[in-house]
Amino acid sequence: MKVDLGDLNAFVAVARAKGFRDGARASGSSASALSEAVRRLETQLGVRLLHRTTRSVVPTEAGGRLLDRLAPALTEVEAALDVVNGFRDKPAGTLRLNVPVSAARLVLPAIVPPFLAAYPDIRLEVSAVDTYIDIIAAGCDAGIRYDERLEQDMIAVPIGPRVQRFATAAAPAYLDRHGRPEHPSELLKHACLRGRFSSGAMPPWEFERDGELLRVDPTGPLLVSVGAATDLAVEAAVAGTGIIYLFDDWLRPHFESGALEPILEPWWQRFSGPFLYYSGRRLVPAPLRAFVDFIKASAELPIPQ
């Protein structure tokens, strides 16, 4: 039986992502094209491969067995084709990255434009989310995470600033009205602008000074989705609504303009910067190899004064 390789790839993308929309994002196709490909494959094979409901898409027993056999085989096909890519003067193809919104905002802008200029035949797809996913299952080549989130079997390469801080700040007008806290515990008496992950988790604000670690769980008039609505919280802070807790680099332009005033700076917690990570169990595709080499070379360049 002769089956179209593209239809098989479409099935794997949907089955891995557990949905046509997520499969489309991971594969760079459209949900309608994937749906048509899977329908065509099921007709040709004469068996249903996916259970479809309005809320989920999961493989049938036949689909699950096909996925188990297909996924390694298709990975080998991709690896074999990528060997040829290594003979090109400039690597070509698609590089898919899954990153936190903070990395898309603070790390990648300094890297992506010069990388794409150096490698014009590479197409970069960046998915910015506020949750940690299985990059392999999502069809991504690599991701960006912080040290505590890295899996043991992943290769990690430093990317971006090696030290970051969480900062607290508010508009000068707010602080003039309500006072300037001198200790993190005083935040419990202030209007604080909080963030919540899509998982429902609302992490406390952490502070550290002279080895003392404090966690504060303040309240306030505004709660936003981390990542997607973080800029709303920043604008609310600038408008004088309350105190914000966010990456120092994210708030830095507002510090420099005077729109926000740093507070509790001696307590700002430092932590190590992010890492690009990818699986060490498979052949590294040429676009990813080029990206890794690029960020390593960039890290060795002197920092402009």
Image (cartoon, helix red, strand yellow):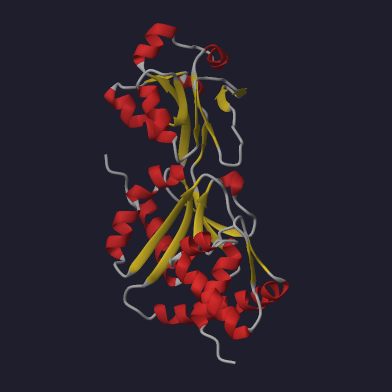
Identify the residue shown where x is 63% and y is 60%.
Answer: 153
Residue 260, horizontal then vertical, whole percent: 35, 22
Name the one closer to the observer, 160 or 52.
Answer: 52
User: Farthest residue in the right direction?
Assistant: 61
Identify the residue shown where x is 66% and y is 80%.
Answer: 47
Residue 278, horizontal then vertical, whole percent: 54, 60
Identify the residue shown where x is 29% and y is 56%.
Answer: 114
User: Farthest residue in the bottom direction?
Assistant: 1
Q: Quadrant of the N terminus?
A: bottom right
Residue 223, horizontal then vertical, whole percent: 51, 28
In the image, is residue 196 above or below residue 215?
below
Q: Quadrant of residue 11?
A: bottom right
Q: Quadrant of residue 18?
A: bottom right
Is residue 217 in view?
A: yes
Name the one closer to the observer, 84 or 49.
Answer: 49
Q: Quadrant of the C terminus?
A: top left
Name the one closer to the observer, 265 or 97.
Answer: 97
53 displayed left or right of 275: right
Residue 31, horizontal then vertical, whole percent: 47, 65
79 displayed left or right of 287: right
Is residue 79 in view?
A: no
Identify the residue shown where x is 35% and y is 79%.
Answer: 88
In the image, is residue 248 above or below residue 6?
above
Q: Quadrant of residue 19?
A: bottom right
Numbered label tally? 0
